[in-house]
């Protein structure tokens, strides 16, 4: 078979859902399925569900040539062996080496990476980066942030992932943006992380705390205090609710500080934001405000030469990046 007829099996494994697809070299999803799993699901059951999805994908491929299996998984991963290191949302997989396990069980080469790193890879080659290249301005350095339950990050330099010594680079969500001793504590145990101030979980937690303080009794959020989510807060902000607006202003400030740090660390010419919170920020037309605030913190005019855009791949950058991991290594 020719390269054009090859396919990659790609998995995007998050804290509550696992998606598997079959993609061609152009990034088109030919087939996909997904399965949910509750928090607290045991290791053997999680691995069984995941392997079952992969077997479904392999069976669907029929006579097609499978170049390999790419896995984007939520949490720190050692890329050579695909070993999980204390994944906060899949903690029962700590120490599990997915690459040798599935290569033995499934008979195909397997590559494993952090989901945010691979989402960055997908956006660079198949999403926002490709769109810029087709417009005549291909990016050199792309930084991707997923802003959803938590905040993850990935950096692509000239088409390759920046991984660090142990594959743990670009944990942008755990960059300190509030150094006060009484700053909000992150789920990682450190205070003042970007994730603790601007993630979906953070927005909901901050809203509940502010409602409990009773400073905004007329806020629509007060009547929904037991079921507050980041989507609730973002929607209320769009309707002019004063408490919601103040919370979202805090999110914009935290993201602006965090992205200014990113600007000085990596000098990107393209920053891509993904995840559910980003969708809310786009609906409120806040990305231009964030970009201007980041530029205001830039140390030089050259640092200001970047674009800030929402994900071009929607829910699919992780799966697209997992497929790209196969194409880059097969």
Image: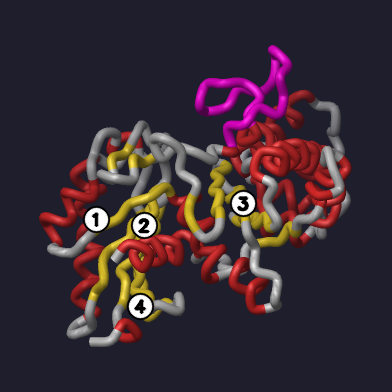
Determine contact: label 3, label 1, CB under 8 Å: no
Question: Where does label 4 land, which residue?
Answer: 31
Q: Earlier in the sequence, mark 1 or mark 2?
A: 2
Q: Earlier in the sequence, mark 4 or mark 1?
A: 4
Which is more foreground, mark 3 or mark 1? 3
Determine contact: label 1, label 2, CB under 8 Å: yes
Q: Earlier in the sequence, mark 2 or mark 3?
A: 2
Q: Residues within 10 Å of mark 1 (few under 14, many from 20)?
A: some
Which element carries disc 2, helix, strand or loop? strand
Image quarter of residue 326: bottom left
Q: Earlier in the sequence, mark 2 or mark 4?
A: 2
Q: CA distance from mark 2 to mark 4?
A: 14 Å
Task: Provide the major secondary structure of the magenta segment.
Answer: loop
On residue 27, which mark appears? none
Q: Earlier in the sequence, mark 3 or mark 1?
A: 1
Q: Earlier in the sequence, mark 3 or mark 4?
A: 4
Outermost residue toward the top in this view: 181
Task: Provide residue 260's location: percent of width, then percent of height.
Answer: 75, 40
Determine contact: label 4, label 1, CB under 8 Å: no
Seen from the viewer's position, the closer of residues 37 and 100 is 100
Magenta stretch in the rendered image: 173-193
Question: Where does label 2 land, which residue?
Answer: 18
Q: Residues within 10 Å of mark 2 (few under 14, many from 20)?
A: many
Q: Is residue 159 left or right of residue 208?
A: left
Question: Where does label 3 land, which residue?
Answer: 143
Colouring method of the image: secondary structure
């Amino acid at each position: 078979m020719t390269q054009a007829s090859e396919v990659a099996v790609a998995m995007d494994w998050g804290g509550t859902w696992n998606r598997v697809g079959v993609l061609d070299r152009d990034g088109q999803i030919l087939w996909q399925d997904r399965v949910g799993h509750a928090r607290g699901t045991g290791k053997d059951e999680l691995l069984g569900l995941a392997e079952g999805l992969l077997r479904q994908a392999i069976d669907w491929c029929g006579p097609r040539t499978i170049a390999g299996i790419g896995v984007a998984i939520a949490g720190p991963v050692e890329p050579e062996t695909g070993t999980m290191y204390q994944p906060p949302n899949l903690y029962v997989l700590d120490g599990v080496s997915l690459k040798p396990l599935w290569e033995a069980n499934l008979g195909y080469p397997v590559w494993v990476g952090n989901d945010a790193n691979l989402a960055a890879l997908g956006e660079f080659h198949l999403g926002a980066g490709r769109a810029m290249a087709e417009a005549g301005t291909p990016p050199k350095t792309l930084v991707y942030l997923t802003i959803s339950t938590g905040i993850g990050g990935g950096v692509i330099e000239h088409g390759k992932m920046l991984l660090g010594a142990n594959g743990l680079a670009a944990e942008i969500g755990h960059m300190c943006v509030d150094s006060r001793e009484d700053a909000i504590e992150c789920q990682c145990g450190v205070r003042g992380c970007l994730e603790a101030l601007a993630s979906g979980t953070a927005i909901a937690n901050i809203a509940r705390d502010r409602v409990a303080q009773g400073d905004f009794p007329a806020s629509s959020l007060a009547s929904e205090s037991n079921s507050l989510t980041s989507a609730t807060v973002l929607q209320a902000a769009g309707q002019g609710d004063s408490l919601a607006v103040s919370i979202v202003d805090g999110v914009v400030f935290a993201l602006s500080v965090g992205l200014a740090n990113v600007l000085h660390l990596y000098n990107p010419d393209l920053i891509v934001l993904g995840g559910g919170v980003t969708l809310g920020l786009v609906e409120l037309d806040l990305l231009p405000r964030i970009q201007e605030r980041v530029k205001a913190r830039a140390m030089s005019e050259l640092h200001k030469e970047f674009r800030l855009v929402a994900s071009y791949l929607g829910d699919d950058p992780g799966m697209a990046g997992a497929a790209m991991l196969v194409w880059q290594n097969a």
